[in-house]
Every structure is written in structure tokens, then in C-alpha cells.
Image: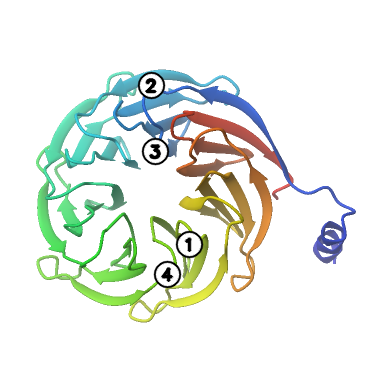
Amino acid sequence: MLQLLSALLFAFGSVSPPTATLIAVQDTPGYAQDVALAGELAFVADGNAGLRILDVSHPEAPREIGAFDTPGFAWHVALSGSLAFVADGSAGLRILDVSQPARPVSLAVVDTADFAVGVGVSGSRVLVADRLSGVHLIDVSDPSAPHTLGVARIGGAALAVASMNGIAWVADGDRGLRSVDFSTPSRPKTLGSLETPGSATALCLAGPLALVADRLGGLRLIDVSKPAQPRALGALVLERGFALGVAARGALAFVAARDTGALVVDISRPPAPRLLLTIDTPGEAWDVEPRGEFLFVADGSAGLRILRANGLD
């Protein structure tokens, strides 16, 4: 009853809408493309400045404590234990030991065929979205000696990848969302696909849902409970800008949108997602990650921005 009353009051303007306040900016030396969080650390894929490691134990006062200047263009970073996996553009996949954040150490490089722009980790295996060459499945059980198990040639431009229950879900650019079965790594096969109206650039999985940042197509919500038959459920089309990154927490989606900033969206009813909050940023928001009451935004030329959000619970 209290939840219903709160919803009614919010709908009719008697309760203040969610708000966010900028509390800190870290002006990274490159171009902040992506951010991943682990404990009290933030790892920023910073374009031509490689990987930057920040202490965010006090979000109001972040400070850089380590860095590794990769030879390519750091597009995306994924973490697993003491390892960081960096999609480094034309330089492929870079594997770093970050057990001592002040002194990250390069363990290995996998020279992918095209341009590594996305990476996802599943146990001892890593999936790399390598644009025109497709998705590479790499065994990293020995991170100093990784080896490729298989490559899925999907025909489009693999821009991001995430896995669930042995299935790889791929943001395939103009061809939308695609599912790939890697159960036989040397012979991966496409199971299903769903075209989106924009260009599928990033995705995250939230239970039976895939949330897709679809550039001009906005945020797309897709039922992926049947990998061979992904089904469109709902969408939030942006008034301006285009969706480049997405994250989820509970019934909320967080969207990074160039020319708009960061958006908070209620996805409790997938057929009818509802915009709760828009946070303008001065850069080109590529990624957003929530952590407690804070939002971390990789804002391109404007570096990493940290905001405190209120009223989202």
C-alpha cells in the first residue's frame, strides 16, 4: 500500500522526483570510454591513454593511483579477480595483473583479427567483440598464456558482448542483437537475432532481459529467455542524443547517451519503461555504472564524472 501511495504521489507531483548532484570530476588524460568498478577502485578505459586506475574510496575526492598506457585505444575494460581485460582496438585484447593497482603488469596480448571494442568475462573464458571479425572466445585459465578457442563470424559488426547460461549475446551494430552458442567452441553457431531500429552498440543482461543501447534507437528491452527467439518488449526513445552505454540494477536501467548525458529509467514494467531522471554532462557520455547512491559516468573528453543520486530506492 505504501509503495502504491508513493507511486501515485510521484505521478501527481506530490513527491519530489529523483535528483542527482555532481560531486567530483577526474579529468583523465585520454578519452573516457568505459568504467568498471571493483571495491574502492574505478578502472577507466581511457582511449589513447590506456587504462587508468582510481581510488574512489572517497567519491568526493577520487585520485589516480595507477595506470597502464596500452599501445592501442582502450575501448572497454572488464574485471575478474586480480585481472583486468582491456579491449584495446587495433592492438587486440590486453590482459593485466592489477593485484597491485599502483603497478599494473601486462601478462599477455591476444592479437585479434580486426578491432577489439568490447569484452566480457565468464569464468576462465573471455569473449571479445572484435567488430568485423566477429566474437572471439579465449581461454584465460593461464592468463599469461591465453589461447583462442573459437571465433563466431556473425556477418555484422560485433560492438559488445555479454554471456549468460553458455550463450553469448552480441550487440551487432546495424543488425541488432544476436545470440551465439559456444558450447562447441571451435564451431560456434548463431541461434537467433532481432533487428533493432538504431545501431546496437552496448548491452547488459538482467535476468531474462537484455538491455540494448541502440544509438538513435534509444534503450531497447528484449526478452532473451529463449535464445533462439529474442523478442522485443519495450523501448525508450531519447528526445535527443543517442544511447551508447547501459547498466542495470534491480528495476532501474542506467543509460549513457551522447549529447544528453546519463539517464535513469524505471524498467519494472518492460513494455513501458519510464524515464525518471536525465543528468546533463558536458562531454560525450559513453558509459555509466551505479554503485550505492553514486553514479560513475565515463564522459569522453570530460573524463570521469561522479554524481550522488537521491530518491532512486
Disc on the earlier residue, 1 or 2: 2
The answer to whether the residues at label 2 and label 4 have Cβ atoms under 8 Å apart is: no
Please state which of the two labelled residues, at mark 4 or mark 1, is closer to the viewer.
4
| Amino acid at circle 2 | Pro
Coordinates of residue 282 in the picture (x, y in percent): 56, 33
Q: Within 10 angstroms of label 3, few (less than 14), some, or many (20 or more) residues? A: many
| Amino acid at circle 4 | Thr
Disc on the earlier residue, 1 or 3: 3
| Circle 1 residue | 211
Residue 188 in the image: above or below residue 299: below
Please state which of the two labelled residues, at mark 1 or mark 2, is closer to the viewer.
2
| Kind of element beneath mark 2 | loop
| Kind of element beneath mark 4 | loop
Disc on the earlier residue, 4 or 3: 3
Disc on the earlier residue, 2 or 4: 2
Task: Tell me how the rendering is colored.
Answer: rainbow
| Circle 4 residue | 196
Coordinates of residue 184 in the picture (x, y in percent): 14, 70
